[in-house]
Amino acid sequence: METDSVIITEQSRQPRNNALWDIVNGSIAGALGKTIEYPFDTVKVRLQTQGAHLFPTTWSCIRYTYQREGVLRGFFQGIGSPICGAAVENAVLFVSYNQCAKLLDRETNFSSLQKIVVSGAFAGSCASLVLTPVELIKCRLQVSNLASGKPTKIIPTIKSVLQERGVLGLWQGQSGTLIRELFGGITWFSTYELMKGYLLHRHEDGGADGKSTTWELLVSGASAGLAFNASIFPADTLKSKMQTEQIGLFSCARKIMAQAGLGGFYRGLGITLARAVPANAVVFYTYETLSKM
């Protein structure tokens, strides 16, 4: 299969980075990507968790947030936790992906694409464990200005969660996050590797030098972000609502269906896809560039 041969050619030229540099490079890439995407993410979370009576459209949410709360207090409310979380998340994603792929490289029964799928699923599952508490605090902060009496700072919000539900309360929405990250990890890494391999294979030398151009890395990263967000968005909506309303997975799904039907699972998809392009392009480009240094 031509697609598979492209991946094999690409991967055979690039040794897996050691774990320490995966952690460092992934952390830097994740923090940069989160800074770019955060204003978009705030709008997305508000659309997912608030009814259409408050925000009938994406632009109504943007206008409301800007007019009532301004740029920093509105769009960047609670960014400290997500930046730290994105650094940890991407460190875990890249180190677990590469370590799993390195282990599978010893096996001859797996095709190149199968290795990517298994490694992506493993990386996403690992990331979900560290991502759930971070996103819980992030989501609560992003809607805190809409609800009177809710903490609007990171530490008070964490204390509030601990007082209400204990330590395990920080993992409220873990099932939604696991579903999202497991399938999202497969989609994210597979799309990136396939697109990168395809673009590299188009070079005059057939990609023999193993070097992707800047635009190829950016396009591959942007494509991965689009595929990831488009494929797992209903799970992300469930996760956001579970964390802000403190309800279970099935109760949350039934509530969304009762209130808004199937379309309720896709509120905020447009702004999410818009944010995915620059953020994921920067994440993969930064990681690849740092890895080559």
Image (tube, helix red, strand yellow):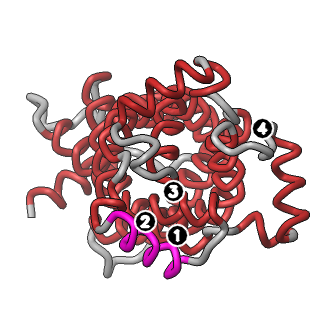
Q: In this view of the protein, can residue 293 be seen by the observer? A: no
Q: CA distance from mark 1 to mark 4?
A: 24 Å
Q: Tell me which label, 3 or 4, sits earlier in the chain.
A: 3
**Highlighted magenta segment, given as a residue range:** 249-260
Q: Label 3 belongs to which residue?
A: 98
The numbered disc on residue 176 is 1
Q: Are marks 2 and 1 in contact (CB under 8 Å)?
A: yes
The residue at which mark 4 appears reads as 152
Residue 255 part of the magenta segment: yes
**Mark 2 highlights which residue?**
235
Decide: few, some or many residues near mark 4? Use Cα within 10 Å; few <14, some 14-19, many ≥20.
Answer: some
Q: Nearer the viewer, residue 51 or 74?
A: 51
Which numbered disc flags the more N-terminal residue, 1 or 4?
4
Q: Amino acid at mark 1?
A: Gly
Which numbered disc, 2 or 3, marks the residue closer to the eye?
2
Q: Amino acid at mark 4?
A: Thr
Q: Residue at x 64, y 20 (%)?
A: 72
Residue 283 pos. (x, y %):
47, 35
Q: Position of residue 179 (x, y in %)?
A: 47, 71
